[in-house]
Each structure stands twice: as structure tokens, then as C-alpha cells.
């Protein structure tokens, strides 16, 4: 079914008008589910629920298909064909079913715009304000209290502090409240087929996504996520889901959309697999004399400076550390005072580097760290 979107649109234009009118009433019923409850739309359909949801699923599918047709389907290009062939030959997918699936996939202009302006391009003092708010700190305390037993069990088992897990969820999705509104398959297809700079990465994620949908009995058209295809409360990419998501509540499903226990255990497992060091500090303030330290400011994030080297650069760390410790020197831009931009210096340890494995940005890791400390201070470790 290699149909160019453009040729279909004229024919479908009239059909769309009609369908839009017909679907107004249906949309009224569906929209509370589609727009305000991503956890329901993004849910993994458990095998036992699959058939019981079939009626609603079909209704949703018909509605989605009619709306998507109005915007234009994915164009059948050689790269789509190549991708489908790969899924058929490497993973034994059914070619006809994949062709049918990709008829419903849409390339989204909005996604292409968003990928060009990530928040991580901001200076620290602006980035920090997005996450260090009273609402986000209070939300973290609330989430922690509601999930006290899972957080404490997971912390005990893995050594990953509860406040770090809570802060990750706070930064990623405001504790599951903002998990994204793009269909994962649209996001990954848009970036895989229409964004050449990251095409190989996103096609790899699309491959992983279809595999995880098959493994977990999920309808690939249903999960929603961020514009980059990150899914559920912890915003795992499909490859991360397949490698690191775990089942905490013992129902054999890894439900990162609904189940807080699965979510908490999956985030902790991600950190364990990236060598979280139990009990080790994360990041420590540093003060400098003179400008010698500037030679140590590089884009690399892995700790590379010995404590002796810190001293040679006239840097003083505000806490004593074991002699073998290595740190990464980090500068965070402060709000300019007059003409002179200021900066704060910090030493990131191995655990800071581990947080940057979740999102490869020192700003991200610092936001997670500072939010975790504010939540911890507000709640207190002991209930
Ligand atoms: Ca589970």
C-alpha cells in the first residue's frame, strides 16, 4: 500500500468533513480519556484486558484514523520500506500487518520544531527555575508519602536513595502528571524517517518499540509520550524499557505508565545498571582562587580530576573525600550581576555522572540533585 499522502488527501478531505461531524459526539466521549488521562491511553493492554477493551479500542482506532487521515499519513518512502523489511527479516514481523500499521502513522511538524530547541540549551539560572518550584517540591513530598513502602523497599534493595528516584519523576513528568501527548509511534517515526541528524538513533528506538509492544502485548498505536518518544512516568525510551524496566508488583508486566511500584523499581534499576555507588556523595560545592581551574572545564562529564589535581588548580572542595576519589569540575552559570556573568563551581562525583546517563546534561543532573535535596528537606527521611 504505497500511497502518497498528498494524493489521498483530496479524496479524504470530503470524507474527513463528514467524519468530523459524525465524530463530534464520539470525540466528546473519548476526549477525556485521550487528552486528560495519558495513563489510560498510554497503558499497556494486559492480555486479560485486551479483549474486553476491544470495543473501545476499535472506536478509538476508527476515530484516530479518521483524524490522522485529515492531517495526512506517513509517506511511503524507501526508508519506510527498508525499515519494514528489516523488521520482517530480522524479527519475523508480518509484512502486511506492518504496512497496515504504518498507514496510520503520521509525521508531525511540531515534533521536528521541538527537537531543534531543547531546554538544555538554556543557562543554568533559567533552567533551574523550571524545576525548583514550590509546587514541584510539594508534589515530590506527596508522591513520596503515597509511595513510601515501595520507595523504601527499593532503596533498601538497590541503594538508590528515594529522594533521587522521586526527583527524577518530578523533573521528567511532574510525578506522572505530564507524560506527553504524542503517540510514541508518530514521534519515533517522525524523527526516524524525517530528521536525518538523528535518524539511525530513532529508527533503532522504533525497532525496539515494536519489539516491546509485541513482547508486552501492547497495541503500538496506543501509548503516548514525549515528542522524542519517551514513555510513561519515568520517560524511558523503548531501548531503555527493554533493558531496564522491571516488574515490582509481581504481575509479570512492566507497567511504567500506571504502576508506581514498577516505575520506582525501574528507575532504581536504571541507576544500578549504570553503576550507582551506594552511599557516595553526588555533587559538592567547590571554591576557586584565580583562573587556573578553567583549564579543567571541559564538555566531558566523567570524573577526571584527582583531589591532588584539584589542589594544584587552586580549588578547594567543601567536604573531605576518600583519597582515591575522582571528580568532574562543573561550572553553572548564575544570573548576571551588572556586566559580569557569575558562575558556581561544583565537583561532580561518579553518582552525578550516573544521573547524566538518564539525560546527558549537567543541567539536568543538577536539577535532579537540587530538587531531591529540597524534597528531602521538606519531607524528612523519617515519616
Ligand atoms: Ca508490574
Image (cartoon, rainbow, N blue to C red):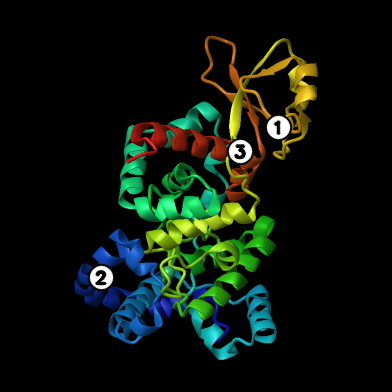
Disc on the earlier residue, 3 or 2: 2
- The residue that disc 2 covers is 30
Q: Quadrant of ligand 1?
A: bottom left
The Cα atoms of the two marked residues, 3 and 1, are separated by 12 Å
Residue 71's label in the rendered image is: none
Secondary structure of the residue carrying numbered label 3: loop
Classify residue 92 by image quadrant: bottom right
Give the residue drawn at x 65%, y 67%. Answer: 204
Classify residue 203 by image quadrant: bottom right
Q: Is residue 286 above or below residue 96?
A: above
The Cα atoms of the two marked residues, 2 and 1, are separated by 52 Å
Residue 206 at what x, y percent from top left? 59, 69
Give the residue drawn at x 72%, y 40%. Answer: 302
Res 245 visible: yes
Residue 280's label in the rendered image is: 3
Secondary structure of the residue carrying numbered label 1: strand
Residue 61 at what x, y percent from top left? 36, 78
- Residue nearest the viewer, comparing 359 with 16: 359
Disc on the earlier residue, 2 or 1: 2
- The residue that disc 1 covers is 327
Foreground label between 3 and 2? 3
Local crowd size for mark 3, using a 10 Å CA cut-off: few (<14), some (14–19), many (≥20):
few
Q: Where is the C terminus found, in terms of image quarters?
A: top left
- Tell whether 47 sits left or right of 82: left
Give the residue drawn at x 35%, y 53%. Answer: 147
Res 109 visible: no
- Residue nearest the viewer, comparing 189 with 298: 298
Amino acid at each position: 500500500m504505497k500511497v502518497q499522502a498528498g494524493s489521498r488527501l483530496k479524496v479524504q478531505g470530503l470524507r474527513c468533513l463528514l467524519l468530523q461531524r459524525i465524530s463530534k459526539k464520539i470525540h466528546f466521549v473519548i476526549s477525556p480519556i485521550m487528552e486528560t488521562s495519558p495513563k489510560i491511553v498510554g497503558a499497556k493492554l494486559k492480555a486479560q484486558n485486551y479483549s474486553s477493551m476491544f470495543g473501545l479500542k476499535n472506536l478509538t482506532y476508527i476515530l484516530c484514523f479518521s483524524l490522522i487521515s485529515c492531517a495526512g499519513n506517513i509517506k511511503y518512502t524507501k526508508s519506510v520500506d527498508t525499515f519494514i523489511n528489516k523488521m520482517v527479516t530480522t524479527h519475523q514481523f508480518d509484512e502486511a500487518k506492518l504496512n497496515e500499521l504504518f498507514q496510520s502513522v503520521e509525521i508531525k511538524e511540531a515534533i521536528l520544531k521541538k527537537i531543534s530547541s531543547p531546554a538544555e540549551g538554556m543557562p543554568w539560572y533559567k533552567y533551574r527555575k523550571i524545576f525548583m518550584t514550590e509546587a514541584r517540591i510539594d508534589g515530590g513530598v506527596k508522591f513520596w508519602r503515597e509511595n513510601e513502602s515501595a520507595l523504601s523497599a527499593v532503596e533498601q534493595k538497590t541503594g538508590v536513595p528515594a529522594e533521587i528516584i522521586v526527583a527524577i519523576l518530578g523533573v521528567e513528568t511532574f510525578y506522572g502528571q505530564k507524560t506527553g501527548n504524542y503517540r510514541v509511534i508518530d514521534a519515533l517515526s517522525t524523527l526516524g524517517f524525517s530528521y536525518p541528524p538523528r535518524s539511525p538513533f530513532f529508527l533503532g528506538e522504533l525497532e525496539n518499540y515494536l519489539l516491546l509492544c509485541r513482547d508486552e502485548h501492547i497495541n503500538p498505536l496506543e501509548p503516548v509520550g514525549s515528542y522524542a518518544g519517551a514513555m510513561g512516568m519515568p520517560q524511558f525510551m523503548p531501548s531503555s524499557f527493554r533493558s531496564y524496566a522491571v516488574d515490582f508488583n509481581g504481575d509479570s508486566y512492566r507497567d511504567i505508565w500506571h504502576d508506581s511500584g514498577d516505575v520506582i523499581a525501574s528507575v532504581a534499576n536504571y541507576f544500578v545498571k549504570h553503576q550507582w555507588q551506594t552511599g557516595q556523595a553526588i555533587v559538592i560545592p567547590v571554591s576557586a582562587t584565580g583562573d587556573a581551574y578553567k583549564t579543567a572545564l571541559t564538555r566531558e562529564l566523567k570524573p577526571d580530576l584527582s583531589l591532588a589535581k584539584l589542589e594544584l588548580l587552586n580549588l578547594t572542595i567543601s567536604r573531605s573525600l576518600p583519597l582515591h576519589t575522582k571528580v568532574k569540575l562543573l561550572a553553572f552559570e548564575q544570573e548576571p550581576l551588572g556586566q559580569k556573568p557569575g558562575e558556581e563551581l561544583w565537583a561532580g562525583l561518579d553518582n552525578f555522572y550516573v544521573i547524566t546517563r538518564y539525560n546527558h546534561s549537567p543541567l539536568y543532573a543538577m536539577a535532579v540533585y537540587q530538587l531531591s535535596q529540597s524534597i528531602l528537606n521538606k519531607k524528612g527521611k523519617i515519616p
